[in-house]
Amino acid sequence: MKLADGVYTLELTMERENGTASFHPVAVETPRGPLLVDTGLPGQADQVADALAAHGLDLADVWAVVLTHHDGDHAGGLAAVRERAADPAVYAHEAATPYVDGREFPIKSDPDGERYDPVPVDVEIQDGVTFRTDAGPMRAVFTPGHAPGHLAFHLPESGVLLAADALRGDDGDLISPAEHFTPDMAEATRSVGRLAELGRDLETTHCYHGGTVDAGIPEIEAVHESLAAEHLG
């Protein structure tokens, strides 16, 4: 799906006991080539390559991978994607870096199980860091709560928000982050409040879980109000 000129969703799927789970990374065209936002689970690199190809893009041309956070469904496929994309630069928030590079164990993974392959982070980014893209500036928005160092990305000239896991889509509606997978709901609530303060130009919110929703600031504000009543007292 095309979110804006040069911004594409990449649907990845995984079979589970209760049905098919879908994940939605994003590819963004830049003057240097494609930039990939998140990589899916281990074993999904072929799906990433096929999804890119459907938009006329080649995984081998990806020059950068930007992680929204360190959870395995976002960063688990990084090692394989990085190898196939000819060693792209890896970007992540400084609070997510220790989990990505292996110094810390992913906080939501089974401590007795195996973790995904660690990968060095080349550039640690913070709130407000902006990437130059064919769709205009793509600005990082620090949105912790769901995970340490969680980032969303705002493309104001295209009216698009890449919310990652700060928000979810549900049959065309915008809903709160999954509480079961969000260690700090109070902080996550404040992060939704930050997203609600983005410009009124926002028309489309893309969620890693649930996909793209025709939702802007009023819908984000409504989610924030509901969360605040429950988690901020």
Image (spheres, helix red, strand yellow):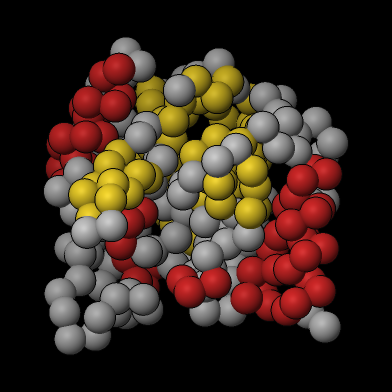
Residue most toward the front? 18
Quadrant hosting residue 72: bottom left
Residue 98 appears in view: yes
Q: Residue at x 67, y 24 (%)?
A: 158
Which quarter of the rendered picture does the N terminus lie within?
Answer: top left
Question: Looking at the picture, how far across and down is residue 91, in whole percent?
Answer: 42, 51
Residue drawn at 73 percent across, 79 percent down: 231
- The image quadrant of residue 53 is top left
Where is residue 100 shown, x and y percent of the image?
32, 65
Task: Please state if 126 lies on the left or on the right of 45 as rendered.
Answer: right
Residue 192: image quadrant is bottom right
Is 232 situated above or below 22?
Answer: below
Q: Is residue 26 left or right of residue 200?
A: left
Q: Position of residue 44 (x, y in %)?
A: 20, 44
203 is higher (above) or lower (below) than 173: above
Split into 4 quadrants, where in the image is the C terminus? bottom right
Q: Is residue 78 above or below residue 130?
A: below
Q: Is residue 35 visible?
A: no
Q: Which is more toward the observer, 1 or 93?
A: 1
